[in-house]
Image (cartoon, rainbow, N blue to C red):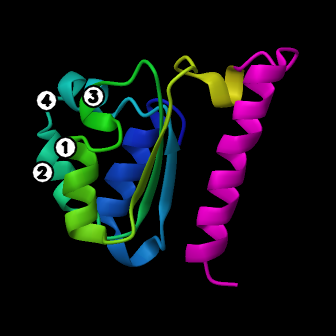
Amino acid sequence: GFCWGAWVVIRACGALPEAFACGASAHPSVSAMTQRWGEDEQELLRKVRAPQLVLASQDEPVTWKPGGSAETTLKASTGDTVFREFGSMSHGFVPRGNMADAAIAGEVRRALEYIKGFFGKHLPQ
């Protein structure tokens, strides 16, 4: 999921653990969405059992960057969760990045390769 779509991924993986082999999110807005809907973010994360790939931009809260509390909680319940930071990219860069800019295009490709590799590892063939 992208942006608030990451909240959907996390909620779905937590609510229907048998239905999902993994999840992937870029520039997640899970914190903003849990605040908006009055949810406990850590409780939501503890329900997730499927490994997650999280790609954070420079704009995500520290809790959603490598080493943050979201990674710690997800790793405790899923094991093979991976967080990566794209520190020079703005929120929304994967679906909305200016592909005419070579630096952004390269980071979008790198993000998509991470997603492709993660799905290749975790989804049934």
- The Cα atoms of the two marked residues, 2 and 3, are separated by 18 Å
The amino acid on which the numbered mark 1 sits, given as a three-letter code, is Ser
Q: Amino acid at mark 2?
A: Glu
Tag 1 residue: 69
Q: Badge 3 is on which residue?
A: 62
Q: Where 61 sits versus 11, above or below?
A: above
The Cα–Cα distance between marks 4 and 3, rounded to whole angstroms, is 20 Å
**Going from the N terminus, do you reach mark 2 or mark 3 first?**
2
Q: Main secondary structure of the magenta part?
A: helix
Q: Earlier in the sequence, mark 3 or mark 1?
A: 3
Which part of the image, by quadrant, shows the C terminus? Answer: bottom right
Q: Which type of secondary structure does the marked residue at label 3 adopt?
A: helix
Q: Earlier in the sequence, mark 4 or mark 2?
A: 4
Q: Residue furthest bottom?
A: 125
The range drawn in magenta is 97-125
Q: Which residue is labeled 4 in the image?
A: 38
* 79 to 29, vertically: above or below: below
Residue 31 image-quadrant placement: top left
Q: Which residue is mark 2?
A: 43
> As shown in the figure, which amino acid type bears the numbered disc 4?
Gly
